Image (spheres, rainbow, N blue to C red):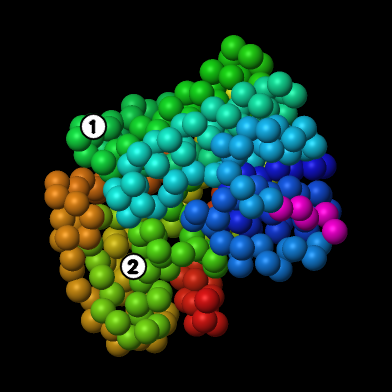
C-alpha cells in the first residue's frame, strides 16, 4: 500500500511513517516544518520506500499530485500546542480549517480513504466524564483564544463526516488524548517533554495553575497502532473515535513522577496561567476518554503504562536532542 502523511515530519507523523515502512508499505510525507522537524525523519531518508517533500498542504497542485500517487491519506498537519494556539490564533484557525478542506476536497476527487486527526480539546469544558464520542462539546467564549483550536478541529470533524455522508468519501476521525513519546517537543507547551527537559537540566519544573488539573497520557506507539488498524476497517468510515489511556494523573503528580524518573532534585514551582499564557486563560479540570467504541471495533486498548511512557521520554532527552 502507498500512504500520504501530511505533517509527517511531526511527532506522531514520523512514528506513523516509521511503522508503515516497517510493515513494508510505501510512504509519502509532506511537511512545512513549522512545528515538525527534519530530524524526526532523518533516519528514514535512506529508505527506498520513503519520500518526503518540504512544503505546505496549502500548495494545492503539489498536494493533489501526492494524493494521486497513494491509496490512503493520513491528515495530521495542524497547528498544535497550547502556547502556539494562544500566541497565533489566526494561524491556528487558517491552518486547521483550510488545510483540512484542501486535503478532503482533493482526496474526494480520487476517493482516497482519509484519516483526519482531531483532539480531546473538542470536548472543551464538558463535565460529562468519561468523554464519549457522541457527547456534547462545551466551548468557551470566542474572546478566549484557547478555544480557537478546539473549534477549528471540531469544524474539521464536521467536514470529514460531511464528505462521508454527502460525497461518499471514506473518512475516519480520531480524537487523540495527550499522546506522548520520544521526539515530542516541549517548545509549544507539551507538558511531559517540558518537565523532562527541566528535570534533566536541574531547572525548576514549572507547573501551570495549581497542578490539580488531570490528564491521561498515551504512548505514541499505542496511538500509531490504532491509526493503522482503523484505516484497515471500512466499518470505521464516517465515524469518530477516542484514542487515549485511562490512567488519570494530576499535573502536579506528573511533575513529581518525571522528577523521580530523571533522578532530579529540581524544585517544582507553580506559574499562574495568566503569566504562562494570557489573561483570563481557561483550562479543563479533567480529560478522560471512553474508549469502548474503538475497543469494540478493532480490539484496541493502550498497552504502555505511564511509568514506561515517562521513562521513554526522559531517556530520549537524556541522549541530548
Q: Which residue is mark 2?
A: 254
State the image quarter where residue 43 is shown.
bottom right
Q: Rate crowding at label 1 as few (under 14), some (14 to 19) or many (20 or more) other CA atoms within 10 Å.
A: few
Q: Are marks 1 and 2 in contact (CB under 8 Å)?
A: no
Dominant secondary-structure state across the stretch colored magenta: strand
Compared across the picture, whether 86 is left or right of 29 comes to left
**Picture layout, residue 110 above or below residue 55:** above
Snapshot quadrant of residue 64:
top right
Q: Residue at x 23, y 32 (%)?
A: 142
**Residue holding disc 1:** 142
Q: Tell me which segment is drawn in magenta.
A: 48-52
**Foreground: disc 1 or disc 2:** 1
User: x%, y% of residue 151?
Assistant: 36, 32
Q: Is residue 113 visible?
A: no
Secondary structure beneath label 2: helix
292 up-or-down from 268: above or below: above
Q: Residue 105 magenta-drawn?
A: no
Task: Answer left or right for 141 relative to 184.
Answer: left
Horizontal and vertical percent position of residue 109? 71, 21
Amino acid at each position: 500500500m502507498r500512504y500520504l502523511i501530511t505533517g509527517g515530519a511531526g511527532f506522531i507523523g514520523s512514528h506513523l511513517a516509521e511503522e508503515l515502512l516497517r510493515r513494508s508499505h510505501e510512504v509519502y510525507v509532506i511537511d512545512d516544518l513549522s512545528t515538525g522537524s527534519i530530524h524526526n525523519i532523518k533516519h528514514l531518508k535512506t529508505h527506498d520506500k520513503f519520500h518526503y517533500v518540504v512544503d505546505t498542504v496549502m500548495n494545492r497542485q503539489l498536494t493533489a499530485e501526492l494524493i494521486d500517487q497513494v491509496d490512503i491519506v493520513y491528515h495530521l498537519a495542524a497547528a498544535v500546542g497550547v502556547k502556539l494556539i494562544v500566541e497565533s490564533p489566526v494561524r491556528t484557525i487558517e491552518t486547521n480549517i483550510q488545510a483540512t478542506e484542501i486535503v478532503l476536497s482533493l482526496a474526494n476527487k480520487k476517493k482516497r480513504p482519509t484519516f483526519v486527526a482531531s483532539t480531546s480539546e473538542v470536548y472543551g469544558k464538558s463535565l460529562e466524564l468519561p468523554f464519549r464520542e457522541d457527547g456534547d462539546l462545551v466551548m468557551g467564549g470566542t474572546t478566549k483564544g484557547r478555544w480557537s483550536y478546539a473549534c477549528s478541529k471540531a469544524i474539521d470533524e464536521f467536514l470529514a463526516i460531511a464528505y462521508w455522508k454527502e460525497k461518499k468519501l471514506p473518512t475516519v476521525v480520531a480524537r487523540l488524548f495527550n499522546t506522548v513519546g520520544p521526539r515530542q517537543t516541549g517548545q509549544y507547551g507539551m507538558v511531559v517533554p517540558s518537565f523532562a527537559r527541566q528535570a534533566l537540566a536541574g531547572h525548576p519544573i514549572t507547573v501551570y495553575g495549581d497542578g490539580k488539573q488531570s490528564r491521561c497520557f498515551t504512548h505514541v506507539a499505542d496511538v500509531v497502532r490504532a491509526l493503522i488498524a482503523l484505516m484497515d476497517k471500512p466499518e470505521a468510515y464516517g465515524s469518530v473515535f477516542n484514542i487515549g489511556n485511562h490512567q488519570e494523573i494530576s499535573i502536579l503528580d506528573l511533575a513529581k513522577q518525571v522528577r523521580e524518573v530523571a533522578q532530579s532534585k529540581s524544585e517544582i514551582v507553580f506559574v499562574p496561567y495568566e503569566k504562562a499564557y494570557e489573561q483570563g486563560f481557561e483550562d479543563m479540570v479533567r480529560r478522560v476518554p471512553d474508549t469502548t467504541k474503538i475497543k469494540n471495533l478493532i480490539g484496541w486498548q493502550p498497552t504502555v503504562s505511564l511509568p514506561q511512557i515517562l521513562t521513554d521520554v526522559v531517556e530520549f532527552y537524556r541522549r541530548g536532542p
